[in-house]
Amino acid sequence: MLLSMPAVPAIMTALVENPAGIEESSIQVAEGGPDRLEEALSALVQRGLIVRRGALVCLPPGAEALTIARKIVAAFRDLQSLTEASFMIRGVLTATEYYRCLVHRDTMFDILTEDGADREQLARVLAAEEGQGYIENIDIAYRVRGGLKEKFFPFIPHHHYDDFVYMHSRAVQNGQRLLGGPAISVVKERYLLANHPPSIAEQARRYMRENKPHILSRVRNEAFDIIWWYDRY
């Protein structure tokens, strides 16, 4: 509902564009139809934010009414943007519907920012998700030998987590040289593991299927390729 322009922001958006007034019949609301529109109009009239004159609705006289209308529209757009960011983060982290998957944090940010998302906003939304206990942070150590870092996997199926950690940590010895070879150091990469309830996860996947199917397919395909690699070797 938040993503499909509820009645109040729909009314105020129309009036910001036409402060002198519009026909009520021209206002389009995505949810609830005429009943929801009437409810919103009545609430706005009671608060003195709009004026109804027969079939016409307009803003009250003066610049203040237009300023308030613009603030309402801006607040809704901010909420809409935050909701979309939340859906995208949840959608990526729960994309592999039939098994849990660790997702490399920076890879997820890169995928979403390439699609137009704001990185700072994604970080704020992610912090909120972590605060609610929906996302677990996991740091995985990678070796750096002679200045060359191991290539990390962007997605790690949770059921292969123990295999992965063993494979990528068995030769690390606190930066000491091995058999006269180049010095080995260790860096940590941040991974995310989702703990969303099934209903929330499915809501996010539905959003991704309808709005970002290319991202959903990319995550699923790359994660499946990694499973195939592990099972093969």
Image (spheres, helix red, strand yellow):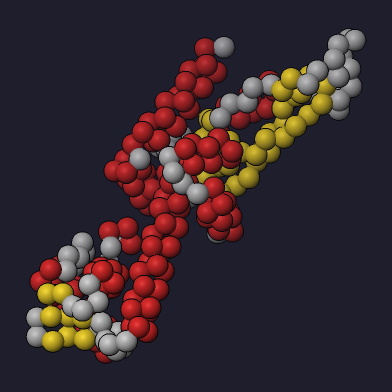
* The C terminus - image quarter: top right
Q: How many marks?
A: 0
Pick whichever, 75 or 214, lies toward us: 75
Picture layout, residue 26 above or below residue 143: below
Can residue 100 be seen here? no
Q: Residue at x 50, y 49 (%)?
A: 118
At 27% across and 86% down in the image, what residue appears? 60
Q: Is residue 174 left or right of residue 211?
A: right
Q: Quadrant of residue 221?
A: top left
Front-most of 47 and 134?
47
Residue at 45% across / 53% down in the picture?
A: 86
Which sits in the foreground, 161 or 3?
A: 3
Q: Quadrant of the N terminus?
A: bottom left
Asked if residue 178 is positioned above or below residue 67 in the image, the reply reads above
Quadrant of the rendered image containing residue 105: top right
Q: Pinpoint residue 50: horizontal percent, then vertical percent.
A: 25, 84
Q: Residue at x 75, y 32 (%)?
A: 187
In the rendered structure, the answer to whether residue 224 lies left or right of residue 129 reads left
x, y percent for residue 74? 40, 67
Coordinates of residue 69 in the picture (x, y in percent): 34, 76
Using residue 182 as the reference point, say whether residue 115 is left or right of it.
Answer: left
Residue 50 shows up from this direction: yes
**In the picture shown, does residue 152 fall above or below 30?**
above
Rendering coords of residue 99 (x, y %): 46, 34
